[in-house]
Amino acid sequence: MPVIVPSGSCATMIRHGYPELFSEDAAWLERAQKLAKRTYEFVEFLDRRTSFVPRVSAAELRFAYHASCHLARGLGVRAQPLNLLNQLAPDGFVILPQDCCGFGGAFALEYAPISSAILDRRLDQIEAEEIDFVLACDVSCLIQIEGGLRRRGSHIRCSHIALPLAGFEPGLR
Amino acid sequence: MRKAFVERAADAIENKALGRALDANADRRQHGRHLAFASLPELESRIQKAHARRLETIHRLDFYLDQFSRSLTAHGVQVHYAPDAAVASRLVLQITQRAGAKRVVKSKSMLSEEIQLNHTLEEHGLEVVETDLGEFIVQLRGETPGHIITPAIHLTRQDVARTFNEKLAMPYSEDVADLNKHARKTLRQVFLQADLGISGVNFGVADTGTLCLVTNEGNGRMVTSLPPLHIALMGVERIVPTAQDLDLMLQLLPRSATGQKLTSYISLLGSLRQNLKTHGIVERHVILVDNGRRSLVATPLEDALLCIRCGACLNACPVFREIGGHAYGSVYPGPIGSLVSPGYFGIERFGHLAHVSTLCGACNEACPVGIDLTTLLLRTRRMYREAKPGAPGLRLGIKLYTWLATNTKRFHAAQRFAGLLSRMLPKRESWIRRLPPPLDAWTSTRDFPPFATRVGNAGALEASDEMPEAGHAQAGADEIPDSNHPPDANHTKTFAQELEAVGGEIRPVSEGNLFVELRALLNEIEVDKVLYSDPDFEGLKPQLEAAGVECRVPMLDGGLDNAARKRYLASLDDYRAGVTGCLGALADTGSLLIACDGAGNLCSLLPEIHVAILRERDIHGSLAEWLEAGGNEYLSDGASVTIVSGPSRTADIEMTLTIGVHGPRRLIVLCIE
């Protein structure tokens, strides 16, 4: 049975991190490899294993797409989200440059000033666009970005890509 | 160590000028790198091949080091081995003192920074001058390099102007060209008076015994050829088995480091047994330094040894971009530094650096030799925790989390509990404004979403099957064409285009009117005396002399005593132009191959203008083609060759490209059709 996770970073950890982590324990390594093989990031799953096409249109939605580092670089999932979003918003949307949001797990707490400095750069890029939403395939990036946007008093909000694709209101909650 | 790091990082983030400089570095270097790699087909397979060759070399390090040492010895070069920094510094000091050297000139060597060589030498009363422009500035200010490729990255032109004004009594000027000119003048005198040159080594070629230095300014060439004594410091991992491997590395290193196809000068230093009377260098020592490198062989961090120090991972790293090099507290900053610093110098001292990363993978993407830096960072984190367990509170927290997260019921209960607790926290529009310690670091700059109070377990879906295997296979790693370009009948055209792209000039001439054209050129540049290295064109020199042009063939005799030698060198300094022949040229990079065993080196290095006479038939497609066509034997025999690509250049002040910092400002090629 496939395991589908809503974040590129989680999928990268399970697929690449777990086998590395258990590399010295044959029994656990085997389990990790089995799990790695059946774990998919959400969009990756849609692309590889289904014939999903968005049945809704969100032409009125002004949004930017943030390609999370682990999705793009860790899993190599670059074109698939864009293909889906092109169908969802045929009139176009903003593709943010391939840059990190500064989250990095415990790094965001342990080295909060550095994490925040990286985030600030990202927020400047986002706020320069005429958009209402940032969409991504990674919940951790989205929490980091929306946390920063809210602190700045920005009107822009974040949403996982799945909500608008399924015809739901975008948003984190 | 971690605490000091946190403080330095915070200062760096506050420093607005540093922020602008780091932005400029990241933008320009990344852009340059992308442009430069566009000219290299099949990049992925080249990276895989480079990775494989580097790894194979590291696995047979003893064999190649032995072969390299024997090749060097045969070339009359003395080889030393230093297991650690202290021995390396002591060896340099001993050689220096034995030779009675007082004045030391250095070209950029991160290894010398690593072993804190300047400190040792200065402590023993030696005068040490860094001659790379960036290093020179940094040394004048009593600082350390902020980047392994761009040492003065952290300084503005105003900083440099003030430093030159204070330390060199130069009238205050913020003009980068002026600053460069002043440095050239100051350092030229230092070069002419130096007793000893110390350089690093980018690559050592095991089978030919060639030392390869990759530079832009020309100071590296001077350091390795003007003083009678040269000491080269080389990390043991910087060895490549053959000249073909060197060719592959040279396709990758300059493109990654500075966005150049080749740097202005690639010095290939060979034997001291050739042209003794004109060579100048009397003694050369190579010190092979381990200092923790070999301790990484056959460990999980082994791949860090594959690094060729291009600095691309620094330029790509979002953390480096915010905090710069100094914050890391190690000579090697950035992603690769966060591996080699703990790897070479101790996991307890530097292991925390592995945590200073979002693991975004920009470094992996930038690495020209395919190092998986993020995986190595994770391994380093693990080793760090094994060597130095975290604070008791953290350990307890992780134990608690493990207990909660390994049981669904407990985990859901904990989530509900957190959700309830979070109701009590201050919020705005439902997001939390302030979290309690230790989570308050988050809310210092960011809001946090409320914890869910409803949690649940979705029902199982019917599906099966596994993903197809990801396509990681190393297909075709051995099938790369060895040359950069398919055979090009019209090498001359490519050569001319590439030469002009790197700032060189080319004028076609016929054999019959070479003299007339050269005479006209010298008139045009208002020169009536030149340093002349017999370009092997019969009768040219007498014709020039008959026309009133003084042609001086510089012969730096190794037998001269120190004072006479310095007088001789000083007497060469007022020639504005040098005329040389060429061993050949490389079309794909617009480069000239200049024989540098004798007069050719001085003629193509000291004057402001270098006029090179090239026969069209000597233009090869690429470095690989030249190696194939006899270059390899040539190097094996111990010849010294400099691959010259355009005039001397630097971008050490605010990334502003300036021409002619140490070597020639102009390069004019007369190409005989």
Image (tube, coloured by chain):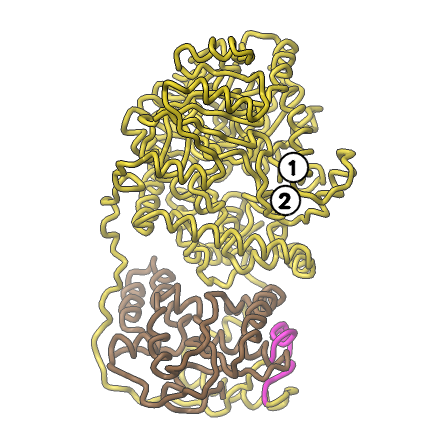
**Going 49% across and 74% down the picture, which residue do you hit?**
A141
Quarter of the image where one finds residue B166? top right
Instruction: Give me the residue at 42% from left, 21% from top.
Output: B581
Label pair 1/2, CB-CB below 8 angstroms: yes
Letter of the brown chain: A
Residue underneath mark 2: B653
Q: Quadrant of residue B540?
A: top left
Residue bearing the label numbered 1: B180
Read off the magenta span: B430-447
Q: Amino acid at mark 1?
A: Asn
Up the image or down, B15 lies above or below B115; here it is below
Front residue of B540/B259: it is B540
Chain holding disc 2: B
Check residue B438 for magenta coloring: yes
For the residues tagged 1 and 2, is the chain the same?
yes
Residue depicted at x 41% and y 90%: B456
